[in-house]
Image: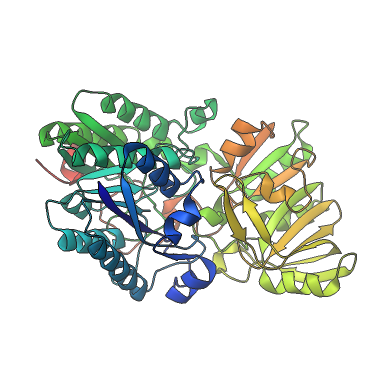
Amino acid sequence: MRVATGGFSHETNTFNPRRTTLERIRRDGLYLVGPAVLEHHRGTRTVLGGFADAAAEVGMELVPTFFATHGPSTGLIDREVVTHTTERLVEGITAARPDGVLLHLHGAAAADGISDPEAYILAAVRQAVGRRTPIVVVYDLHANIGPAWAEHADAIVGYKTAPHTDLYERGVDGVRILARTLRGEVRPVVRLAKPPVLVKSGLMSMTDAPLALIKPPMYWLMARANELERRPGVLNVSVAAGFGDADVPEAGMTMLATTDGDPALAQRIVDELAALAVELRRGFATDLVMMAPAQAVDRAVSTPLWPVILADQGNNTAGGSPGDGTAILAELKRVGWPDAALFIADAQAAVAAHGAGVGGPFRMAIGGKLEPSNGDPVEVEGRVRLLSDGQILDQHFGLPVDLGRSAVVRCGHTDIVLTERPCSQYHPGFFRQFGIEPRDKRITVVQSAHLFRDEFEVREHIPRTIIEVDSPGITNPNARRFQYKNLRRPIYPLDEIEEGEAAARVAGTRA
């Protein structure tokens, strides 16, 4: 079994004014060709790490072609990126002369003039390999999947958790489905349905841990999907929560089912899940889970139940924010710089702190420079406590991270980590690598919607209180605050959808 593998990954917040260019990907992301694709990911808990390990187990020869990715801190992708990526993938796959193709495509990319880049890539790959060569895709839970995916892929497998803790396992699933297909054991067929439900950033928590009860809609959707997946003849059932931060026609939830040669069964499954999504839609109301910045900081300072985690929803760098939001920073200053720690992406400030040196005075307006709705710069005065080159390890995924020149500035009892490049602090290790222990801090601010919960809450049991902060910014979960121009309409919560008309509003494949 000779299988070509590769992919493309970008979660595109179209409200972010900074373009995602090929130059940025080469400089700040990953641009991997040939053997480097697997060498970089082997031994990691990533999709491609799962591909590598599972392929060895089933006797599959993986031929790595091309993989590119950039963090979600930039916005709309230049068309050149998509065409270049497609050309490199098709070139590598064609040269490999494979029996099958295994791709990792994030699913939430959006480019200038190409609203569904993954479908664009899939169409080109399908044309290159023909109809008889099976293509299996593994995607991120936050994918905006268009109906065209089902036209070109034989099986589509998605993450089942948020926080994302199963990337590796889903990579393994993709390999096993493809291996069974190549052996002639199964004949996969995929169907999808798109209910008229749009979900933004921080309303997607889905995990088997007790914390899942905080936001039940995704939990119950995925629980039902897992039940349906156990039926005879079903190879995979996935729920894509979608990525409401991308203003594209494909945005919104998608239900997917891959069965063994039974399109009618696959269709019944996705139709049932689509109807359930409409039924549960009101559970995604943002006012059920968020607190205004001033109220959140006041509560964090006064509660005896600390350590406190403040989840900065509007400034979520894992969802597309450039990471320089100042709403919580301003409130920490208002209350006199309490025992707290937070990150601010501000290249100018990080360089200035290096100029001051360890122990040197620091006074500057920081943050609020990259994205207009993220708040105004905040004047801070303190001393530089630590300097770093910003080369750290993401201990959640086992991958290196380059934050550029970085510094810790202490104002009162608050530690501000200034970085040239943004990051999402979903692991306590992000703070520890800058000499800050979240267990000992009264307040820790994370620029993360839900991924932080796995490491902070489930694995290390650090916080006694978690407050989700209704901060301004392009990743705020309330879709009604944003102006969409390209979405398919009507769609909840921008439009009211009645249960009786839901079936007529579902888009997708039909048997």
- The answer to whether 287 is drawn above or below residue 359 in the figure is above
In the image: residue 299, left or right of residue 184 = right
Identify which residue is drawn at 81% across, 75% down: 355
Residue 406 spot, x, y in % from top left: 72, 64
Q: Which of 459 and 115 is in front in this view?
A: 459
Residue 486 spot, x, y in % from top left: 29, 63
Residue 381 spot, x, y in % from top left: 84, 65
Q: Quadrant of residue 451?
A: top right
The type of colouring in the image is rainbow
Identify which residue is drawn at 30% across, 24% down: 227
- The answer to whether 99 is drawn above or below residue 117 in the figure is above
Taking the image as drawn, is residue 437 in sight? yes
In the image: residue 503, left or right of residue 214 = left
Identify which residue is drawn at 26% across, 38% down: 177
Taking the image as drawn, is residue 501 in sight? no
Residue 392 spot, x, y in % from top left: 66, 56
In the image: residue 261, left or right of residue 440 = left
